[in-house]
Image: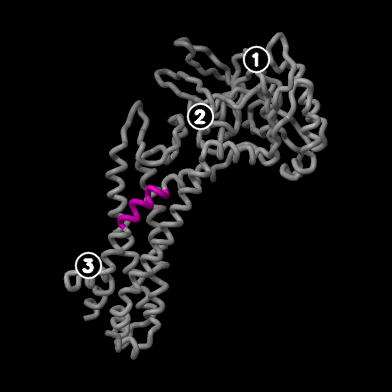
């Protein structure tokens, strides 16, 4: 007898689902959960991936960095606007003269600089394997590694020494992941790599190895190659490191005008000054990533609210029958805690089965866009940033099955918690009804 009563409570959607030829409210809730699982997968996938990337550490010290960009005035050299070495050094001296500034790095444009996605690649060859490594050109003799706060590994030259690598010296700097990807170890200072250029192999020497960094907030790539470059462009940009204990935002507010005044020369002037974090946020805004994340989170919140309302509404529709049943069970000695557990078990079972079915439906769709080409897993049915990611740096985001399982797990947890919360609210009201009142329910 007790087993029969337990069965009736554990599967309310089926026991009372079809009465008089009509589909019961719990059946509708179950079908709704299946549909919501599929929709939630699509909604939560980009939000989860972008939030994962956002949670990853940058790898370099950007807490005391400022960003500044210049605009040309009017001076021309031989009919061309160029930044000469003398002008570069003059502007560095001017900016470093401002109190509170520790170092200044000047670079020629946004391409290949830290904080931007626009990078070129080196095609490193080892035996029969090819390793595509994103490359960042740094202006030699311009405090690149010190200003950004890149950390050399033990056994590597100091950051200052790495910043002074000479042009055309065939020396490069690798991140730890790039060194391990190519050599299998990070103790590689003085070793050589083979770079394919125009179908010929050039030999490059590893001058140093630094800790992993991310080139931009939207990428998880850690294998990077740094090579010295010259300054030979129209406009210049600055990464400015402040001294310890100085707040970048407050510095811009209090000393920004002085810094802009010092950066004004006959050749160019500073037109934008901000903290480096604000600069990274602006770059993300320009590429539409925050809008995409916010849109996904808004849709997710919308579905969560409606899911919770649907669960509460459906349980309330069954309240009269459940109230009577709970009254009978309490008359036979069932406790409130046991009844509440039965309600939650019902909801958890329904949510679990619905999510499993919904994820299987989405898996069939997702697999339709899956293929393996040149050793890479490619799929356009699940969210993955459209960047070339070296094989050594591919995370769960770029692998089909881990991607599917992780997002499915998050979707399951969200729906399960929502169903349990939505079930608890009316369940407490139902089981709190007096036994005499419950037994009078029809």
Q: Specify the segment rendered in magenta.
A: 34-44
Left or right of 431 on screen, residue 244: right
Disc 1 crowd rating (10 Å Cα; few below 14, some 14-19, many 20+) is: some
Left or right of 65 on screen, residue 222: left
Q: Name the foreground residue: 57 vs 301.
A: 301
Comes first in the chain, label 3 or label 2: 3
For residue 38: magenta? yes
Residue at the image point whose x is 64% and y is 41% from the top: 278
Residue at the image point whose x is 45% and y is 29% from the top: 388
| Viewer can see residue 52 | no
Question: What kind of element bears circle 2?
Answer: helix
Q: Residue furthest front?
A: 74
Q: Is 357 placed above or below 234 here?
A: below
- Reading the image, the residue beneath label 3 is 23
> Is mark 1 in CB contact (under 8 Å) with mark 2?
no
Q: Name the foreground residue: 37 vs 74.
A: 74
- Reading the image, the residue beneath label 2 is 180
Q: Residue furthest left?
A: 21
| Nearer the camera: disc 3 or disc 1 | 3
Cα separation, mark 3 vs mark 1, equals 77 Å
Disc 2 crowd rating (10 Å Cα; few below 14, some 14-19, many 20+) is: some
- Reading the image, the residue beneath label 1 is 167
Scheme by which the image is coloured: one colour
Question: What kind of element bears circle 3?
Answer: strand
Comes first in the chain, label 3 or label 1: 3
| Nearer the camera: disc 1 or disc 2 | 1
Q: Name the foreground residue: 37 vs 303.
A: 303
Residue 339 figure quarter: bottom left
Quadrant (top left, top right, bottom left, bottom right) of the C terminus: bottom left
Q: Which mark is residue 390?
A: none
| Nearer the camera: disc 3 or disc 2 | 3
Residue at the image point whose x is 64% and y is 33% from the top: 151
């Amino acid at each position: 007898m007790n087993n029969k009563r337990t069965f009736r409570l554990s599967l309310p959607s089926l026991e009372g689902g079809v009465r008089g030829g009509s589909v019961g409210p719990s059946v509708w809730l179950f079908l709704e959960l299946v549909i919501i699982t599929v929709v939630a997968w699509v909604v939560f996938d980009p939000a989860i991936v972008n939030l994962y990337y956002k949670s990853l550490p940058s790898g370099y010290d950007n807490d005391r960095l400022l960003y500044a960009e210049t605009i040309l005035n009017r001076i021309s050299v031989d009919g061309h606007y160029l930044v000469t070495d003398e002008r570069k050094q003059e502007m560095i001296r001017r900016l470093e003269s401002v109190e509170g500034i520790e170092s200044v790095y000047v670079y020629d444009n946004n391409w290949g600089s830290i904080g931007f996605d626009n990078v070129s690649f080196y095609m490193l060859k080892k035996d029969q394997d090819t390793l595509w490594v994103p490359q960042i050109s740094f202006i030699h003799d311009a405090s690149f590694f010190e200003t950004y706060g890149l950390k050399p590994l033990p056994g590597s030259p100091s950051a200052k020494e790495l910043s002074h690598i000479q042009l055309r010296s065939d020396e490069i700097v690798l991140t730890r992941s790039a060194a391990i990807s190519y050599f299998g170890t990070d103790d590689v200072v003085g070793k050589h790599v083979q770079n394919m250029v125009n179908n010929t192999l050039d030999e490059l020497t590893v001058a140093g190895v630094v800790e992993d960094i991310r080139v931009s907030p939207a990428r998880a790539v850690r294998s990077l190659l740094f090579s010295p470059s010259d300054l030979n462009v129209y406009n210049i940009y600055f990464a400015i490191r402040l001294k310890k204990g100085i707040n970048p935002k407050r510095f811009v507010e209090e000393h920004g005008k002085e810094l802009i005044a010092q950066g004004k020369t006959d050749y160019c002037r500073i037109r934008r000054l901000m903290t480096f974090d604000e600069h990274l946020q602006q770059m993300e805004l320009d590429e539409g990533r925050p809008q995409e994340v916010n849109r996904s989170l808004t849709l997710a919140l919308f579905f969560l609210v409606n899911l919770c309302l649907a669960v509460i509404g459906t349980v309330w529709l069954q309240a009269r029958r459940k109230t009577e049943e709970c009254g009978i069970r309490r008359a036979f000695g069932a406790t409130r805690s046991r009844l509440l557990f039965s309600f939650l078990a019902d909801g958890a079972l329904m949510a679990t089965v619905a999510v499993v079915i919904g994820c299987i439906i989405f898996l069939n769709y997702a697999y339709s866009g899956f293929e393996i080409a040149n050793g890479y897993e490619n799929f356009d049915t699940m969210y993955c940033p459209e960047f070339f990611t070296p094989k050594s740096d591919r995370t769960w985001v770029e692998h089909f099955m881990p991607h599917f399982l992780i997002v499915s797990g998050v979707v399951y947890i969200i729906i399960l918690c929502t169903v349990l919360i939505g079930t608890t609210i009316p369940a407490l009201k139902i089981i709190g009804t007096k036994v005499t009142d419950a037994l009078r329910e029809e």
